[in-house]
Amino acid sequence: MTQAAEKVKKTKRKKTAAKKPAAKTKSAAGEKSAKPANSGAAPGEEAEKSIYHDFDALTEYLTDISGKSQEVVREFFAHQAGFKKVTSELPSDPLNVGEAFQEMMKGLAADPGTVMQRQFNLWGDYAKLMATMSRRMAGEHVKPAIAPARTDKRFAHPAWNENPMLDFVKQSYLIFGRWLENTIHEVEFDDPHDKAKAEFFTKQFVDAFAPSNFAMLNPEVVEATIESKGENLLKGLQNLLEDIDRGHGELAIRQADLDYFKLGENIATTPGKVVVQNEIIQLIQYEPTTEKVAKTPLLVVPPWINKFYILDLQPQNSFIKWMVDQGRTVFVISWVNPGTELKDKTFADYIRQGLFEALDAVRAATGQKKADTIGYCIGGTMLSTALALMAKKGDKRINSATFFTAQADFSEAGDLLLFVDDEQLDAIEKQMDAAGGVLEGRAMATTFNMLRSNDLIWSFVIDNYMKGKNPAKFDLLFWNSDATRMPKNVHLFYLREFYQYNRLAKGEMVIDGETLDISAVDIPIFMQAGETDHIAPPNSIYKTAKLFASNGNDKVQYMLAGSGHIAGVVNHPAKNKYHHSTNRALPATIGEWKESAELHPGSWWPYWIEWLNSVSPGEVEARIPGDGDLDIIEDAPGSYVKVKA
């Protein structure tokens, strides 16, 4: 903890000791806080009286808080001599947004009639808003000119509807945001990529200036401030300074309590042993919980963009534990969190030293010549590439392949395609060179967070810095914050060869001197997709399934799960959440597939394990880590996963 943060805590303790005990009430922020005294109120009156009754006392208190805050900030920066100094240099445009917006302005200038019409539409919408608000102020019950989507959590507080001023601000924002996004959508662009980029960053702008992001307009923040007499603002300042300190001068927003979870203690706890280690992987073999296990072992290939324990958060939602309990001998690759010493590693190295050495180790541990495999996200993309390479070389070590939200055809890969034009990739390369040949984990995490900025950025700004709430003890968000680095060559190959050029799907990718053909893969394939996945869209996964089946492989199955990239995968059957759709056929389009698909309630895991048992039959005595030809190195989850970025 910084000295500034410690001073904040001392200030709070001093002030708390000077106050008399006060009655507690539940604030809008969901925490206990002191409520201003309601002197002179008749019995039973306090519950009905507005909490906004003591502004004089609040003003005096906030002035005091402001003075203390300035002292804290001054002391904080006095102790941070290593922070970057602000210069007069203009920042670069690594995302190449400027060019996209220049293209937009050119389109607007070329079509002044459309601009005028759009302007009239905006004026008309505001005139309608003014008319409805005037009627409301006159006491008439009127329908709003515009309403937020039902799923929009930003305006859930009743005050956004009940308070006329806030209602007007909310509707004004929604009208302008809708107008701006529609205007960008209707502008003609010479380059569709520039148009998509302009639309994406326009939405980022609209999300950023939402009135809920401003403390004085957000009713939840105002209530928390009045009820706690400004304590939330002081605590929010403490959170802000600690996050700046943790980010070494850049804001690193905490999404979860980073001190609560301990790997191997209350997260990633499924018993197992590390049985292989090289410079890029540790291989974990998990201890059995059944007397008999499936004859064919199971190897899980997680993404190296994240850490493997997304599949082993806690016992009640652990996919790995569930698989062990189903009688499977489970092996999982734990990728190294690479430093600059691995900057020259290549995508082919990750296949050879990652997947292929893991397959050799599984054979040594179990005596089985083949393994069933699972590839998650980029781990699945690598598995697809490796399968095409193995088909070329006649390598038969894989019995079946299951893919969790993993793409091999990137022609419809969603919003991440916006980040892979030449200018942006050149900027990323320069960023990695400056960092010694690796991409810092926070950089990629920020990109993913931008895809859902309201949920993964702005909600935490409000909770952490305005409401002064402590970060949640939430296993999934802890994992999401535990970022990893990526070697330069591996990451650029992934972005250029898959996202930018889609070479694997086109049959143009070359690995180890071999031109790869994914349609030559002839093993059982199970493709899982998530309905609301914003990273690997369901149609992109469907096109990948069709790619595997394009040469007559009738052992390819596609399954669509409820939810998105994470919750669509990590959905333990005991939770009874979401749903999944199945259809053994693979018609031309995903629309046709959906028309004849069957909807099932709950998790897809039982359906999948039934499929796996059908393509991977047979049982043997349970295998204990260390009983085969591999020695035990250390306990799971191993040391590689504990390395912080």
Image (spheres, grey):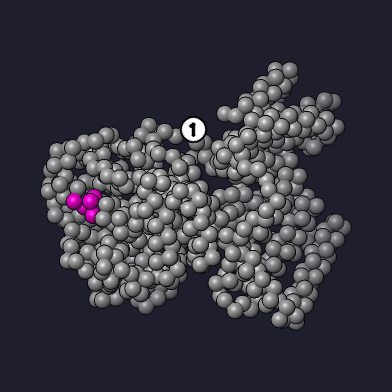
Q: Toward which corner of the image does residue 629 lie, by quadrant?
A: top left
Q: Main secondary structure of the magenta part?
A: helix
Q: Is residue 226 left or right of residue 419?
A: right
Question: Residue at the location (57% across, 61% down)?
Answer: 95
Question: Residue at the location (67% across, 59% down)?
Answer: 206
In-front residue for pair 377/424 = 424
Q: Is residue 278 left or right of residue 197?
A: left
- Quadrant the C terminus occupies: top left
Question: Residue at the location (16% across, 44% down)?
Answer: 365
Residue 247, image x, y percentages: 56, 41
Considering every residue shown, the one lying at the far right of the view is: 138
Magenta-drawn stretch contains 358:
yes
In-front residue for pair 114/195 = 195
SS category of the residue bearing label 1: loop
In-front residue for pair 502/186 = 502
Magenta-drawn stretch contains 340:
no
Residue 288, image x, y percentages: 22, 40
How busy is the neighbourhood of tag 1: few (under 14 within 10 Å), some, or many (20 plus)?
Answer: few
Question: Residue at the location (19% across, 47% down)?
Answer: 361
Q: Is residue 537 above or below residue 169?
A: below
Q: Which residue is the site of mark 1?
A: 259
Q: Is residue 536 left or right of residue 375?
A: right
Amino acid type, mark 1:
Asp
Residue 203, image x, y percentages: 63, 62
Residue 73, image x, y percentages: 70, 33
Q: What's drawn in magenta, residue-wise?
A: 356-360
Q: Is residue 305 above or below residue 4?
A: below
